[in-house]
Amino acid sequence: MNHVKLLDGKSALVTGAASGIGQAIVKALAGAGAWVAVTDKNGAAAAALAKEIGKDAISAELDVTDAAATAKVFEQAEAAFGRIDMVCANAGISTMNATVDLTEAEWDSNMDVNAKGVFLTNQAAVRRWLAAGHKGVIVNTASLAGKLGAPLLAHYSASKFAVVGFTQALAREMGPHGIRVNCVCPGFVKTSMQEREVVWEAKLRGMDPDAVRKEYVLLTPLGRLQEAEDVADIVLFLASDLSRFLTGEAINASGGVTMD
C-alpha cells in the first residue's frame, strides 16, 4: 500500500527485519520516506533486503541478546544517518510445547530473544536519545499471546506479556522526555514462523495442519488469517506523528481475536 510520506527525513532501526513481519515493517517505513537500518541475526538476508529497498538503507547482522553488539549497531546507524528517530524492536522466536514437557532451554531462549532483546534494544535507544535531548519513538512487537495466555505457548506468552509490561513501564519513564513507547500485538499472521507453529500445534494436538489454520480463522472475527502488512501499517502509524499523543499502548492487531 502506498502511503503519504509520513516519515520523510526520518530514520529508523528495525530488529528481526529480514523476513516476516519485520520485512513488512521495513518496507512500510521505507515506503513512507524513512531511511532504514535493517538488522537481523541473518546478516545476509538483512543485506539483501536493504539492497532491495535502496534509498540509502543499511544493514547489519545483530543478535539482540548481545548488549555490546546492539550498542555497536546503533553506533553504525547513527554514523550513517546522523541520528535514529524511530526504533522497532521486532526480533522474536517461538517454540511450542505443553508446559509439563517444556525444557529450561526453551524457556530461556524465548525469554532471552523476546523479552531481553526488547529490553536491550530499547535501552540502547533511550540512552542515546536522553543524552542528545532527542524525542524518539519506539514500537515493540508483542503478540496476541501477550494479551491472552496461549496453550502450548506458556513460555512464549510469558515473554510477550513481559514486552507489554516493559513497554508500559518505559513509556511512563520516558514520557517527561517526550519519548514515546508503544507496542503492537499481532494475531494469527501468515509467516514462515506461523507455518512452523501450525505444524507443531497439529502434531501436539493430533490434528491436521489445515484444521489448525481453519481454527485460527474461526477465532478471528474479520474472518481471515492476518498478513504481515496488516501489522506493518499499524507500526507505521505508531512511528509517525499521527500517533503523537499515544504512549504506553499495546495495540491489538488481531482482527478482533482479542478486544481487551
Image: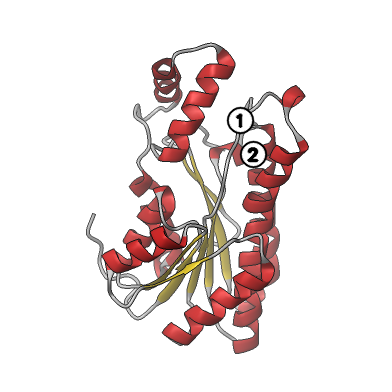
* Mark 1, secondary structure of its residue: loop
Query: Where on the picture, by quarter, is residue 167?
Result: bottom right
Amino acid type, residue under disc 2 in the picture? Tyr
Name of the residue lying farthest toward the top = 206
- Residue toward you, 207 or 141: 207
Q: Is residue 110 rendered to the left or right of residue 78?
A: right
| Residue 4 appearing in the image | yes
- Residue 137 coordinates in the image, percent (x, y): 52, 70
In the picture of the structure, the residue carrying the numbered disc 1 is: 96
**Residue that appears at 63% across and 26% down:** 152
Labels 1 and 2: the sequence-earlier one: 1
Q: Is residue 7 rendered to the left or right of residue 75?
A: left
Vertical order, 114 against 13 (above or below): above
* Label 1: how many Cα within 10 Å (few below 14, some 14–19, many 20+): many
Amino acid type, residue under disc 1 in the picture? Met
Q: Quadrant of the C terminus?
A: top right
- Residue toward you, 178 or 144: 144
- Residue 82 coordinates in the image, percent (x, y): 46, 87
Query: Where on the picture, by quarter, is residue 9?
Result: bottom left
**Residue that appears at 30% across and 68% down:** 51
| Residue 245 appearing in the image | no
Vertical order, 31 against 35 (above or below): above
The answer to the question of whether label 1 and label 2 lie on touching residues, with beta carbons closer than 8 A, is yes
- Number of numbered discs overlaid on the protein picture: 2
Vertical order, 249 against 55 (above or below): above
In the picture of the structure, the residue carrying the numbered disc 2 is: 156
- Residue 184 coordinates in the image, percent (x, y): 51, 50
Per the model, the C-alpha gap separating discs 1 and 2 is 8 Å
* Mark 2, secondary structure of its residue: helix
**Residue that appears at 47% across and 26% down:** 198
- Residue 123 coordinates in the image, percent (x, y): 66, 70
Please tell me whether mark 1 or mark 2 is closer to you in this view.
Answer: 1
